[in-house]
Amino acid sequence: MAPVIAVRDLTKHYGGTVGVDALEFSVERGEVFGFLGPNGAGKTTTIRLLLDLIRPTRGEAWIFGRSPGDPETRCATGYLPGDLALDERLTGARMLVFLDGLRSRAAPATDPRRRAELCERVGLAVRDLGRPIREYSRGTKQKLGLVAAFQHDPDLLILDEPTSSLDPLVREVVFELLAEARRSGRTVFHSSHVLTEVDRTCTRVGILREGRLVAVERVEELRRTVARKMVVRFAGAAPVSELKLPGVRTLRTDGALVELTVSGELDPLLGVLARHSVEHMVFPEPDLEEAFVRYYRRNGEPSA
Amino acid sequence: MMGGAFARNLRHHRRLFAALCAAAAAAELLFVQVAAAVDTGSGFGDLVRIMPRAVQTMFGEQLALASLSAAIAFGFQHPAMIGAGLAFVVAAGTIPAAEREGGLLELFLARPIPRWRYLAGVLALALVGVAVFPVALLLGGMVGLATVSVPGEPAWTRYVMSAVGLGFLLFAFAGIALLIGATAARRGPAVARIVGLALTLYLVDVFGARLAWLAWLRWVSPFRYFRPIQSAVSGETSLVHFAVLAIAGLVCMALAFAWFERKDV
């Protein structure tokens, strides 16, 4: 089956400035693909290229095997911009209907019950929907943008920083919506610079740095490659010499207490620990942030 | 989309549009009243004679046409009237720049809407102004003529071609406004460019008629092809002038569509 998003040598230059350079990646059906990078890395430029809002300097992108500008493609896409702008003169309810009406005439209109359900879930009260958007707070506008993106149950969701300006409760709802989308076989392209969010929602991530894709990996794989910190308190003296294993680096030893980092396979280290009496051990979940930062060290060259 | 965008654009601009049309109609009505008052008094001939020579020189050929009909038709050529018509056309034509600046364009064009259809919705609004604004002026003139009693004053139909001419002038500027509005990133600079251009072209026409060295440049000014007074007084209408304005508008519109299709938004 053709990937939902396929990108080959996608490049966008703004005069002498590089927006994105030679991007190559694909997103399969049912995936939640995280697109990570700090501000200015080229995430929004990539999204605009995928939506045919801007035209590439070089390379191509396909959505559902078609050109990004194809009306059918867009009909099956839900989009939430990072810098969401809404028509401030319209009421929230009218804006949702208007945006839905911009889809192809051939496409069925959104079921008002689905819209109402989404509004309720993100906490948009009927009272809010009847007010002009100019009276909305930033968070309420973002909720409206989310409903607009999800309301027609699109096969592909392109979300640029979807949880910005949202309170933690609504953020949870967004995570639920993303999980539901994934379960129902829909595809999500989730651009973010919030690692915990991507860690929680995505199956694979692409890491962007200064317009170039420096890595595309599964989230678990990314975590696996991270040098994870471990603190072990042995019952007796720490077996320092036995801990000299490939991928294990001892940071500090203080009698029975050892602080170390471990990357790659855990089995050899666990074998050593099993041979000794361990009183206490702290081994937190691998932090995606460490993996992410790794790609930004040394001019973006991943460190060994 | 075109219908939806047009309806939305019209809803957002209806107050401005109604105000400009009402002001133009009221001003034309006033023109008729003043012109009728002058005509029943000492008459236009005397009025011209008492004008300072400098003013006579400035208005030149226009004063040769001094009459009640010409004074009423002058309403169609008055800079304030043209300015009001242009204001609406510019407001409509620069919607793409405003929506690009505000971020709405991105939201709309991410939907399955061909770019040409979005721009057609904007153009449709500008064309409403092109069609309705001259009609509002004509209505003002009609009402004015119905309320005055001047012997020998011809029917309001004498001014129909003046209104048509104004429509063609606004059509040409609708094209210019759309071209600039579709390619600009922000509305403010787009409006400034259109207003600056319109003012320059107006002055080129005014001074081109008086300064021999500037006369050749008049040909590029749309105002050169808009002669409502001659049309009302002599009853002669230059279809060539209408065609020039129509072609200028159409070329600009075609360029706007072609450019907008290729442009990054």
Image (cartoon, coloured by chain):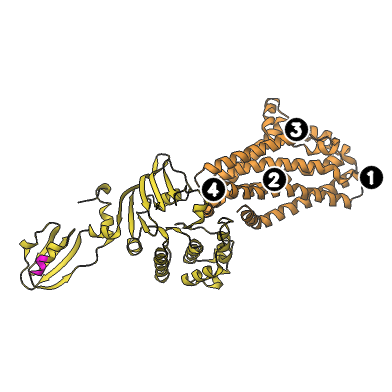
- Closer to the chain start, of discs 4 and 3, is 4
Residues at marks 4 and 3, CA–CA distance in whole angstroms: 36 Å
At x 16%, y 71%, the residue is A281
The lab-note entry on whether marks 2 and 1 share a chain reads: yes
The lab-note entry on whether marks 3 and 1 share a chain reads: yes
Residue that extends furthest to the top in the rendered view of this protein: B213
At x 82%, y 37%, the residue is B231
Q: Residues within 10 Å of mark 4 (few under 14, many from 20)?
A: some
- Provide residue B194's location: percent of width, then percent of height: 61, 42
Q: Colour of chain A?
A: yellow
The lab-note entry on whether marks 4 and 3 share a chain reads: yes
| Amino acid type, residue under disc 2 in the picture | Gly
Q: Which residue is mark 4?
A: B186
**Front position among marks 1 and 4:** 4
Do labels 2 and 1 touch, CB within 8 Å?
no
Residues at marks 1 and 4, CA–CA distance in whole angstroms: 53 Å
At x 39%, y 63%, the residue is A182
The circle drawn on residue B151 is 1
- Closer to the chain start, of discs 1 and 4, is 1
The circle drawn on residue B83 is 2
| Residue at disc 1, secondary structure | loop
Q: Residues within 10 Å of mark 1 (few under 14, many from 20)?
A: few
Residues at marks 4 and 2, CA–CA distance in whole angstroms: 21 Å
Residue that extends furthest to the right in the rendered view of this protein: B151
Q: Colour of chain B?
A: orange
